[in-house]
């Protein structure tokens, strides 16, 4: 669920130029959402990285980026993104269109509706960072929802999850549960640009962060000797790092529940890193959320290993770029974060500059690139210009009738 949800919820030739800042397998589930079925709506395509890794090499920046390894496909996605900018899903009001729905919460990206014992989670195209919305990214909501569904299906051997069905490309219907007010942030590298990122606090001198002792002498983007958990909780409109002891002593979670959720989070991250590396990527860090059902089952909720909740780097170029003091090739929203940090104060300015169209389209491409790389399937770009909200309302109404 959205972090804001209540406890009861669970670029492109011709575009203006802008500067970009510098598996083990588990059995497929029979409950895998129908519109993501590998035999139905998704067609197999060669993994984007696998066919190009040898040619790309590991140069210090002169080698072609793997993100541009399939220029024809990339240009097609960028063109589609530019054409879809006027049809992004920025806001929703399903409660006015679908009988019986109640708006429970509006998060930074997801809008949460209640219907009896179920939640309807609508993933919008809103782009959030620095605890505020920066832009709307074409296809983003669909990418996030389908990425999460793919991971939910493949992590059932680690933890149950709240997914019931997915009646629309942007929607997940989930079981209602009591959401723990803690985000389980797991990190494998010293990196980041936000106030709560590990590199920011480490560079300011912190050597004990969220109960983890950090040794001296580390540099930005360095791999940690072991993955660590750096939990956060919500205060007003920003994340607050906390220690496990503070979580337990404050009554946010019992020790038993925290220990189980921590174990699940670390196992999910290790598995995510394994799958990512098999596909030429590094899962750098991510966050998980958990809820508890009435019978005491702790379930994975919200999203899993998406480019919004996670940081990904290109694996083949990481070591060479790190030793050369260059930033890793990232496949997430970090470059957009850096653009805003270089052009304004995203934490304090009342109004932010508009994100350049080139960067918005580039981010849409990166999100789709990540989905296709991880899942080895081709992302389905909507073929019609039907307003997204109308499509979602129709599909949700039908799904709820069938529950």
Image (cartoon, grey):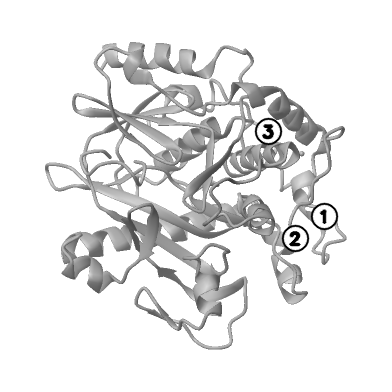
In the displayed structure, 152 sits above or below 204; it is above
Q: Which residue is mark 1?
A: 56
Q: Which residue is mark 3?
A: 45
Q: Nearer the viewer, mark 3 or mark 2?
A: 2
Element at label 2? loop
Element at label 3? loop
Element at label 1? helix
Relative horizontal placement of residue 310, taking residue 278 as reference (left or right): left
* One can see residue 83 in this view: yes
Position of the C terminus, as image quadrant, is top left
Q: Do tag 3 and tag 2 residues touch (Cβ < 8 Å)?
A: no
Alpha carbon separation for disc pair 3 and 1 = 19 Å
In the rendered image, residue 177, in percent from the top left (x then y), is placed at 21, 40
Q: Quadrant of residue 31?
A: top left
Q: Nearer the viewer, mark 3 or mark 1?
A: 1
In the displayed structure, 67 sits above or below 238; it is above
């Amino acid at each position: 669920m959205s972090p804001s949800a209540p406890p009861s919820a669970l670029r492109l030739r011709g575009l203006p130029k802008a500067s970009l800042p510098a598996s083990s397998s588990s059995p497929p589930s029979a409950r895998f959402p129908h519109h993501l079925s590998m035999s139905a709506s998704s067609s197999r395509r060669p993994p984007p990285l696998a066919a190009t890794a040898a040619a790309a090499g590991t140069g210090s920046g002169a080698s072609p980026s793997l993100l541009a390894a399939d220029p024809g496909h990339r240009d097609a996605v960028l063109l589609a993104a530019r054409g879809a900018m006027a049809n992004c899903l920025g806001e929703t009001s399903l409660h006015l269109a679908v009988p019986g729905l109640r708006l429970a919460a509006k998060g930074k990206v997801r809008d949460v509706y209640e219907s009896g014992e179920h939640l309807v989670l609508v993933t919008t195209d809103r782009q959030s960072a620095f605890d505020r919305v920066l832009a709307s990214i074409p296809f983003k909501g669909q990418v996030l929802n389908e990425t999460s569904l793919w991971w939910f299906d493949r992590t059932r051997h680690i933890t149950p999850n709240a997914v019931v069905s997915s009646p629309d490309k942007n929607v997940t219907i989930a079981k209602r549960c009591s959401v723990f007010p803690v985000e389980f942030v797991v990190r494998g590298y010293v990196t980041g640009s936000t106030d709560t990122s590990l590199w920011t606090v480490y560079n300011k001198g912190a050597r004990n962060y969220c109960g983890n002792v950090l040794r001296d002498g580390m540099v930005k983007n360095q791999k940690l000797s072991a993955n660590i958990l750096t939990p956060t909780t919500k205060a007003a409109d920003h994340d607050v790092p906390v220690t496990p002891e503070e979580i337990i002593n404050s009554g946010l979670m019992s020790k038993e529940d925290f220990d189980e959720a921590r174990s699940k989070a670390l196992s999910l991250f290790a598995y995510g890193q394994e799958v990512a590396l098999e596909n030429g990527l590094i899962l750098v860090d991510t966050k998980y959320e958990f809820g508890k059902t009435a019978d005491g089952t702790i379930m994975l909720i919200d999203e899993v290993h998406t480019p919004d909740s996670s940081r990904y780097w290109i694996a083949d170029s990481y070591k060479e770029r790190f030793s050369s003091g260059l930033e890793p090739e990232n496949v997430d929203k970090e470059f957009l974060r850096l653009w805003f940090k270089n052009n304004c104060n995203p934490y304090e300015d009342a109004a932010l500059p508009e994100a350049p169209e080139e960067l918005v389209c580039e981010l849409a491409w990166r999100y789709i690139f990540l989905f296709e790389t991880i899942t080895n399937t081709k992302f389905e770009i909507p073929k019609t210009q039907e307003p997204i909200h109308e499509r979602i309302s129709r599909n949700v109404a039908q799904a709820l009738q069938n529950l």
